[in-house]
Image (spheres, grey):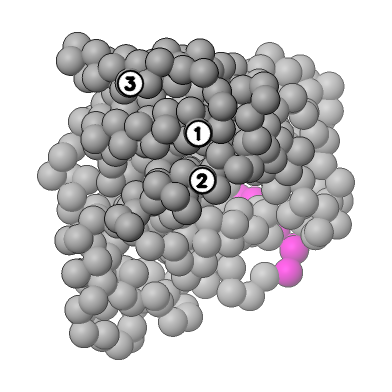
Amino acid sequence: MKKYLLTPGPTPVPERVLLASAQPIIHHRTPECGQILSEDIEGLKYVFQTKNDLFIFAASGTGAMEACVVNLLSPQDKVLIVNTGAFGRRWVNITKLFGIEPEVIEYPWGRIANPKDVEKKLKEIPGIKAVFTQSTETSTGVVNDIQTIGKIVAKTEAVLVVDAVSGLGGQELNTDEWNVDVVAGGSQKGLMVPPGLAFVSISQKAWKLVENSKLPKFYWDFKAYKKFLEEKKQTPYTSAVSLLLGLQEALRMIKEEGLEQVLQRHAILASATRKGVEALGLELFAEVPCNVVTAVKVPEGVDGVRLVKMMRDEYGVGIAGGQREYKGKIFRIAHLGYMDRFDVIIGLSALEIALSKLGYKIEVGKGIAAAEKEFLK
């Protein structure tokens, strides 16, 4: 059975990237590897839309999130976390692990953050060092208004830290223009690379916190990464060399297509997916849907867990189910990274068949037709 991957990470990897990753291994302490690392960093700055310092870690996106916390903060620091889902909750869990009790603005799953709530909290609580939030929240399919939040935080002494692991390369994020001080990213989503690389960009404003941070860190130490890059064009610890080669090729592909065109492609795929599921009488879960994954409410009378399993095991189409308390209540179809129009058509086709098999009454082909009409615009 042929398999199709429509999950919000890992996402499909282009053949060019796979072949690049399969090149003979090179030593990480060589000029050749230094050149690859330098090209990767410059390419990532293009995707991040930043001129700030940027580091690459051998880790998942969660590693980048932990790195942000331990490099920016000290014990008893005041922080504000904007929580719109599972990954907002992850910011909470990481900060608490390091002995910091965050002030949390928590929204019901499916709702977006209100920038006015952030502004109010920053006025009510003096001395907040950092505001943590998400660009796109993978668990719910929402996109937050980072541009407006950035304007608000920029007027204060706090720094804005954004989890862009799922949105990077698929949802607009103009790091410098939007006053985002720190961005965390990962390789396995919009950047079309296998899991295993994490990225962090840091503004000059954020470096002031890094210089005074008292939380323990060894592997994640931004100052060590900066020193090795400037002096040796290396990482302080062993690089994931094969993944760096794959990333090099993936970034070349993004530049060939053009970032603006990449973002437009994601917007079209997202719109077609939404039109398709709505044509089937299904309801979107996200208040403001993002362009990287569409979250959909499971219709009454359908077993949501079985739906996801059937699509994967019987039809070879992998989508994601709901997380935590929304397991079985929503499902998520990604249109992220190395995907095009026919990935959406295949996903909707499998969804129609699976829903029909599970007893949900639909007009077969209606979702596909709605998506195709969107592609014809």
Task: Name the residue type under label 2.
Answer: Met
Tell me what residue is drawn at x 55 percent, y 23 percent. Answer: 360
Please identify the quadrant where the C terminus is shown. top left
Position of 175 relative to 72 (above/below): above
Expressed as whole percent of the image width and height from the top left, the position of residue 19 reads 19, 69
Per the rendering, the mark at residue 310 is 2
| Secondary element at tag 3 | loop
User: Are the residues tagged 1 and 2 within 8 Å (C-beta)?
Assistant: yes
Which range is magenta? 208-216
Query: Mark 1 or mark 2, which is nearer to you?
Result: 1
Give the CA separation, mark 1 to mark 3: 14 Å
Position of 185 relative to 365 (above/below): below
Expressed as whole percent of the image width and height from the top left, the position of residue 347 reads 37, 36
Tell me what residue is drawn at x 26 percent, y 26 percent. Answer: 264
Position of 84 relative to 5 (above/below): above
Q: Is residue 114 rendered to the left or right of residue 2?
A: right
- Front residue of this view, candidates 131 and 303: 303
Label 3 Cα neighbours within 10 Å, binned few <14 / some 14-19 / many ≥20? some
User: Are the residues tagged 3 and 2 within 8 Å (C-beta)?
Assistant: no
- Front residue of this view, candidates 285 and 307: 307
The answer to whether one can see residue 211 in this image is: no
Tell me what residue is drawn at x 51 percent, y 13 percent. Answer: 281
Label 1 Cα neighbours within 10 Å, binned few <14 / some 14-19 / many ≥20? few
Tell me what residue is drawn at x 18 percent, y 45 percent. Answer: 255
The residue beneath circle 3 is 365
- Which comes sooner in the sequence, label 3 or label 2? 2
Q: Is residue 75 rendered to the left or right of residue 194?
A: right
Figure quadrant of residue 113 = top right
Is-magenta flag for residue 19? no
